[in-house]
Amino acid sequence: MISARNQLPGTIKSITLGAVMAEVVMDVGGAEVVAAITRNSVEAMGLKEGDSVQAVVKATEVMVQK
Amino acid sequence: MISARNQLPGTIKSITLGAVMAEVVMDVGGAEVVAAITRNSVEAMGLKEGDSVQAVVKATEVMVQK
Amino acid sequence: MISARNQLPGTIKSITLGAVMAEVVMDVGGAEVVAAITRNSVEAMGLKEGDSVQAVVKATEVMVQK
Amino acid sequence: MISARNQLPGTIKSITLGAVMAEVVMDVGGAEVVAAITRNSVEAMGLKEGDSVQAVVKATEVMVQK
Amino acid sequence: MISARNQLPGTIKSITLGAVMAEVVMDVGGAEVVAAITRNSVEAMGLKEGDSVQAVVKATEVMVQK
Amino acid sequence: MISARNQLPGTIKSITLGAVMAEVVMDVGGAEVVAAITRNSVEAMGLKEGDSVQAVVKATEVMVQK
């Protein structure tokens, strides 16, 4: 169990690999959620399109727009 | 328009105010999303329960869990 | 209106594109401010040198050095 | 020397202390920059109004708005 | 399994609770590591002094100082 | 002196350079700590394998896992 307050279930739609970073696009309840993580994380976790995952975000990283 | 890739529409369910920080709980498509922002932001924006808002998160702040 | 407390007006001086990330260097009142955002954000927003923009930073991301 | 790309010189205008967090408002070249740091950092550094400081931000935490 | 690259095993030394935030001080291999998380996370996880935990940090949040 | 609460001494084990970002792997007391910083920071600081450095993390970026 991790202290991050936001853990949204979704599915990986696409992954773009750079030399150091990777962009992982997820479908979360019909909305698109994008994560920029290291390429090494993608490879260590064996992430691929179609995987069931959670998008996880610490509460201090969330802003509110109105 | 802001570069943050994640902008999820939702509704404010509750706000807890501390001396410096505030916790804003939103309903985003049935899921709960929590933001820890400054109390001054809550007051400057006049945020209150029931407001239609967006939860905004920079892609570099999103992790993937599997 | 977004809850991020810091919104500094400036001008884009240069943009470097990687496969996933991009570095955007801005002139903010004579000082240089650097943002690392996704390449896709740069393209979606059509950012280019000379654009008038704001550098936006959440208060929880700012440190103080003395 | 720290890798954070953004180090903006300024002066502390006000400090608000909570139980855990503190809000430090700085004047940076005439603009207001706000940091939310721990109260313990404020006390360990002896920060007070009028101090000459730098607002430090990692490039991955900066967004661009247009 | 979470994509965050840094997961350091440690023990909770102390917890300070504010209205919204909490400070959790951990001993990680003899060094002190401090986390500022929401009070609600501390309570939901039942964190207390002496607990064996991991300090988790996304690689994009780590700076290098020399 | 910087307000970031976590400053862990270590040694650089490897550096991977991308077009915009770089991954710096450090040995911190026998544990591996990974930083994703800009390539320009690596070059401006002249970072290289074997350098004695500190991994620096703001407390608001640390999560707790149990």
Image (tube, coloured by chain):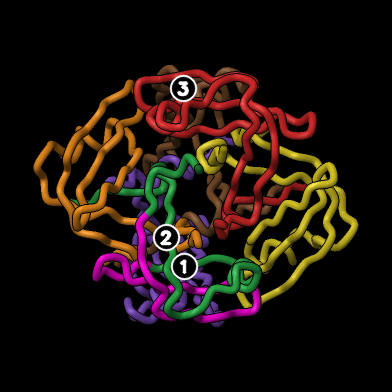
Chain colours: A orange, B green, C red, D yellow, E purple, F brown
Q: Residue at x 38, y 63 (%)?
A: F64
Horizontally, is F1 left or right of E47 in the view?
right
The disc label shown at residue A41, or none: none
Under mark 2, the amino acid is: Gln
Residue E29 in the image, given as x and y percentages of width and height: 43, 55
Q: Nearer the viewer, residue F20 or B5?
A: B5
Q: Which residue is mark 1?
A: E37
In space, the residues marked 1 and 2 are separated at their CA atoms by: 22 Å
Q: What segment is highlighted magenta in the picture? A: B8-33
The disc label shown at residue F20, or none: 3
Q: Secondary structure at mark 2?
A: strand
**Which is closer to the viewer, label 2 or label 3?**
2
Q: Confirm or deny contact between disc 1 and disc 2 (CB under 8 A).
A: no
Q: Label 3 is found on which chain of the structure?
A: F
Q: Is A15 rendered above or below residue A52?
A: above
The disc label shown at residue B54, or none: 2
Q: Nearer the viewer, residue E32 or C33?
A: C33
In space, the residues marked 3 and 1 are separated at their CA atoms by: 30 Å
Residue B6 in the image, given as x and y percentages of width and height: 37, 49
Q: Secondary structure at mark 3?
A: loop
